[in-house]
Amino acid sequence: MCKIILVFTAAILHPGLSVNSQWVYQQVPTNASYYITLEFPSAQIGIAGGAFLSANFFGRGAYTTNSGNNWLISLVPDSLRVMVEIKFINLTTGYCAGAYNLNTTSHTIEMIKYDKRTFRVLPGQNIDLVDNYKGLFMKSTNSGQSWFTYGSLPSSVYYLLALHFVNSTTGFAAASFDFSGGVDDRVIKTTNAGQSWTVLTMPENINNLSDIYFIDMNTGFAVGYDVVSDTGRGVILKTTNAGISWSRQIFMELYRFYGVHFTNSSTGLAVGRAYSIFFEPDDAKIYRTTNAGVNWTNVFNFDDVEIYGVNFAPNTGTALIYGYNFFLNFRSREFIARTTNFGNSWTESVLNDTSLFLFDTKLLDQNNWYLAGGDMHDSVFNGPVILHTTNGGAIGIEPISSEIPERFVLFQNYPNPFNPVTNVKFQIPKPSFVKLVIYDLLGREVATLVNEQLKAGTYEVDWDASNYPPDGGQAPSGVYFYRLVVGDNTNNGVGFVETKKMVLVK
């Protein structure tokens, strides 16, 4: 019998399958600080947008005509502040939501006072020239090679925050109607491809709208938050009559929603941010609907993560979420996780970087994906990033034998003692949700090697202690424990648990 062994090196992170993923950095122009929007109207043509940070914010764009093998600088208006979201209606014609600078007077940029995705001022921040911008809608007719201001927005729009077109003429945008972010956001609509816009009636006051998505001409969703008695509450708005009226669902356990996306007319995911407790980092929550937004259920959570969006591969159960991880001492690292079963379980990919923030993705199919963001050190974005994968982003873990085991077994790691790599082998006799975690002698979680649904089989995985801790260096010599838990991701219905000891020596 031939055995095919596929192993990977695990990095340290919160619970979630940790694998070295097959994401490749693409060569992008260096005139931007970060990209926050990404669009691919075809497999070859791609468009990115973001901003350059200096004494002010200046919008920047890029385009490719060869699947990202080369990215070139897009021509944009001099007054452009930021490109927030790009949507194309065909191979050549696309639109962009964002903002422009009223003037370019120099001032100090304090990143903590701005929303990281849009660089709109956060609520309550006292910043000079806080009203130094207005909303901007742009158009491209040459696949993003150049952009120009187009149409007429309502004069009181200070920012465009999200954009979605349902056909070549009808589009919806989330717009800010107050220069202090998180005060008064609404949905606006165009039926003439952005030449003019109508302000739609919202259910009471909505403080913030982060994303917008329409299933068809009539049914759409907008997500964000509102504030009552100084308390933020996650909000999902829904319309079934093309935006004439909206219903509102409140989620008290959330501070806000960041993104929403549907794979078909009934099934969608929404991602949000839960409240922190005692100044701990916030947690991310994933909600799912299977009845076109009538009900939403919390299906998965991630600790110490901020998720900026969710996107499905077209007409599949495969979706990607993205953002960044929090760590102690204000450190952070990129966050990427995927599902292939409509959000029931998630596999996390790790690039072993410590400073990426990821703001957008494009899934062309189940394997061909792009991610956009920036490299951030000490609260400063140092350059844009576009990543590309052609195998769904991760190697994954596969059984090393075609034989079905008769029972659950966790084997002793080999070698033991080890330095710095050891192998852990286990077997499961039936399809199960499996979690394999490394702990130190004090019971602190060191690494999560597996955290996903697996079919019956025998598996093995390496742990490389030189990847611990996440800010560099190797794990200290001593005793460690590895624990196999077979059940589900909520720790209910656990069918098998076993812990074994391992020793790291130098």
Image (cartoon, rainbow, N blue to C red):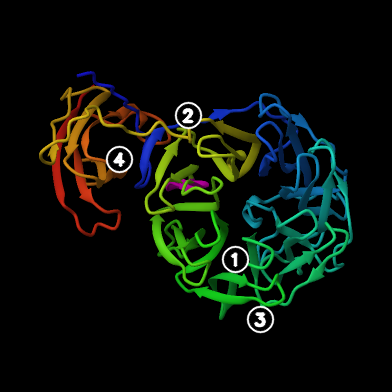
Q: Main secondary structure of the magenta part?
A: strand
Residue 474 visible from this viewpoint: yes
Q: As drawn, is 106 to the left or to the right of 252?
A: right
Which span of residues is magenta-colored? Answer: 319-330
- Tag 2's secondary structure? loop
Q: Is residue 69 above or below residue 101?
A: above
Q: Please give the residue where the numbered disc 1 appears in the rendered image.
A: 224
Q: What mark, if any, has residue 75 been given in the picture?
A: none
Camera-near label (1 vs 2) is 2
Indicate which disc, 4 or 1, sits on the residue closer to the N terminus: 1
Q: Is residue 125 above or below residue 40?
A: below
Alpha carbon distance from label 1 to label 3? 14 Å
Indicate which disc, 1 or 3, sits on the residue closer to the N terminus: 3
Q: Please give the residue where the numbered disc 3 appears in the rendered image.
A: 204
Q: Quadrant of residue 210?
A: bottom right
Q: Please give the residue where the numbered disc 4 appears in the rendered image.
A: 450
Q: As drawn, is 224 to the left or to the right of 279?
A: right
